[in-house]
Amino acid sequence: MARSQPDLLLLHAPSVYDFRKKSIFYGPVSDLIPSSTVFEMYPAGFLTMVAYLHAKGMRVRVANLAVRMMKDRHFSVPDFIRKQKPKAVGIDLHWLPHAHGALEVAKIVKEIHPDVPVIFGGLSSTYFHQELIQYKQVDYILRGDSTEGPLYQLLTALGDGGSLDSIPNLTHKRGGLPHVNPLTFLPSSLDFADIRTDLMVEMVLRHRDLASVVPFNGWLKNPITALFTVKGCAHECATCGSSHTTCGHLTMRTEPVFRSPENLVRNAVALSKFSRGPIFLVGDLLQAGTDHAEAVLDCLKHEDIENQIVFEFFDVPPVEFLRKIDRCTRHWSIELSPESHDHDVRRAQDGEPAYDNQQMEDVLREALHLRCTRIDVFYMIGLPRQTYQSVMETIDYCERLFQMSDRRLSCFISPMGPFLDPGSRVFEEPEKFGFRQFARTLEEHRRLLVEPSWERILSYETQWMTRAQLVDATYDAGERLNELKLAYGRISKKRAATVAERIRSARELRARLAKQEIANGELEGEIDKFSISTVCDKRELFWHSHLINFRIGGILRTAMRYYFGGRRENHL
Ligand code: B12
Ligand code: SF4
C-alpha cells in the first residue's frame, strides 16, 4: 500500500525546547493544571481542527512532542521530524509559555523540510502575529479563536497554488513583508466542529503511536476530558487573556458564543463511549442564560451519562439550578474560582463582585446537601491590590470553608504565572492596575523562559508584591494550606508530608540559587523534584479513577471500523 502524505502534521512543543538538558527551577506555576512545568497539554482546538479537516477529506496527524520528550529521554525531535513527510506543519503558540519551544521546533522543521509550510495559531500567535511572522521559520499565522475554516482554505490554496488574499484571519509574508488579511472568520456558534475521539483512536492505530496523542503525561491514569461550551467571555477579569475587553480587540469577539445544548451533550455522549473519566464542561453554562443552561441539563438527563460531569461557575449559581443538576446527572462536581476572599482585591480584578463570601458559603452548603461529589474552590496569588497579608488571610478563609463543610470541599491556591496573559487589561495598562512588566514582546518572553528560576521568569510584579514577595507568599500560603488540609482530613499524612518536604526543598534551592551555589548541570533532570506538586499534590486535582479507565467497547468498535472498514494505511 502506498504511503499517503498527511495534509497536516500538528505539533505541540514543550514550553522550553531543550528542557531535558536545562537546569531551570520553574516553580509551582503548573501545580493546579493537569500538565507539568513542560506545559505538555496541547490546545483542545487540535481536536476540532482534526475533526473539521477530516470531514473535508483531509488527513491530519497530531504529535505531542512534549509528552514524547517527557516519556522517553532519548526521543529525538529532529529524528522524528525527519521521518515525517507532511504537506504542511502546524504548531500551536496558544499559551505564551510555549514561546521558546514552539519557535525552536519550527526552526527544526524548517531546517529538515525547508519547503514544507509552517503554520502557527492560537491566542499568543494572534496577539504577537506582527512580530511572529518576522521569524524565518514561520510562514503563516492563523489568528482568532476559531481557525478550522481558514485552515482548510489555506491548506487547499497551498496545495493548488490558489490565492491567499481571500483567506480570512491569515497573516503571511509577501515579498518578505508581513501581509495581514482581515480577521473575519468568527463563527457565531460552536456546533460546526465536534470533538471526534474516534479519530484520535484511529490516529493511534494508524501510526501505532499512543504517546503522541495523549493530551498530557499521566492522562491514561486520569483521563479527564474537556468540552468547550463557549468562546469569548462576558466577564472582565483584569488578568485574563480572554476577557470581554481582550476578546474585543484580540479575537474580535465582542460577545461570547456557545455550543447548543444538543450539540454539547452529543459530544459528551461521544466522549463517554470511550472514557469513564470526568467530563469537564469548560465555561459557565449560565453565561448563555438560564434557559440554555437548563436545556443542557434536560439533554443530559435524557442521555443518562455515567461519567462524572464537572460544572464550572463564574458566579455562584442559583440553588434551584444545583437541584436541577442533581436531578439530571448521575455524578456531578463543581468548580468555583473566587480568586481571593478579599472584597477589595476581587473588585480590582473584575469590578464589583457578583457574590460575597457569605453568598458563596450558602450555595456551597446547599450543594453539599445534594449529591455533589466534589467542590473545588480556586484562589490566586498576584492579583491587583493583593498584599502578602491578604494572601495569608485567604488561607485563613479556607480554614473557615473547611470547618463548614465535609471532605468533598477542597481549596487550592497558586501563583499567576509564569506570564501575564498578553492582551489582558493588566498587560495593556500595567500602571493603571499597579503592575510592572519585565517583558512586552514575544522575544522578551522567549528569553525569560530560560532564566534559572521562576522568580526571574515571572514577567511581572505588582505595587503590592515584588517578585520575591510573590514567591514568598506562594510557599508560605502553600505550606499553611497543606497543614490545614491535613488537619481537616482533606489529604493523608503521607501526602501532606510529601508536599511539606517539597516546599522545604524548593525554599532551600531558592536560597542556593540566590547565593549562586548551584554548579552547572547539577539540576539536570531534577526539575520535577522542585517544581511539581509543591503548593499541592497534583493528585488532589484528579477524581477517583477506575480500575479500567476506558470503555473497551467503544475503542474496539473504532478499531474494527479502522481495520475492516478499508481505511487502513501504512503508518509513517
Ligand atoms: C480550558 C482552558 C485551559 C485548560 C486546557 C484546555 C486545552 N487543552 O485547551 C487548562 C485548565 C488545562 C488550561 C491550562 C493553562 N492555561 Co488555559 N485556558 C482555558 C480557557 C478557559 C478556555 C480555552 C478554550 O476555550 N479553548 C477553545 C478551544 C476549542 O479552542 P483552542 O484550543 O483555543 O483552539 C483554537 C484556536 O486557539 C486556534 N489554535 C490553537 N492552536 C492552534 C495551532 C494551529 C497550528 C492553528 C492553525 C490554530 C490553532 O484554532 C483552534 C481551533 O479553532 C482559556 C480562557 C478562555 N475563556 O478562552 C484559558 C487560557 C487559554 N489559558 C491560559 C493560560 C495562561 C493557561 C496556562 C499557561 C496556565 C498555567 N500557568 O497553568 C496553562 C497551560 C497548560 C498547558 N498547555 O499545559 C490563558 C492564555 C494566555 C496566553 N495567551 O498565554 C487563557 C486565555 C486564560 C487564562 N489565564 O486561563 N487552560
Ligand atoms: S478568567 Fe474571567 S474573564 Fe477570563 S474566561 Fe474566566 S470568567 Fe472570563
Image (tube, rainbow, N blue to C red):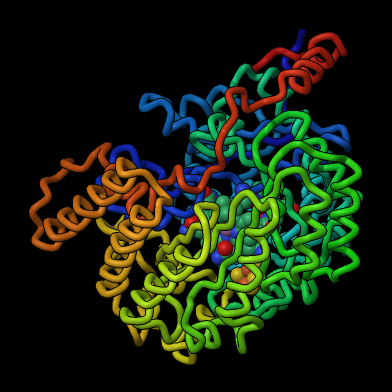
Q: In the rendered view of the protein, which quadrant contains the N terminus? A: top right
Q: Is residue 436 visible?
A: yes
Q: In the rendered view of the protein, which quadrant contains the C terminus? A: top right
Above/below status of 517 relative to 360: above
In the image, is 87 to the left or to the right of 167? left
Ligand 2 placement by image quarter: bottom right
In the image, is 359 to the left or to the right of 421? right
Q: Is residue 242 visible?
A: no
x, y percentage for residue 452? Answer: 25, 56
Query: Closest to the observer: 407 or 552?
Result: 407
Instruction: Tell me what residue is drawn at x 49 percent, y 89 percent.
Output: 344
Instruction: Tell me what residue is drawn at x 78 percent, y 41 percent.
Output: 195
Query: Closest to the observer: 247 or 112?
Result: 247
x, y percentage for residue 411? Answer: 47, 61
In the image, is 449 to the left or to the right of 296? left
x, y percentage for residue 18? Answer: 36, 41
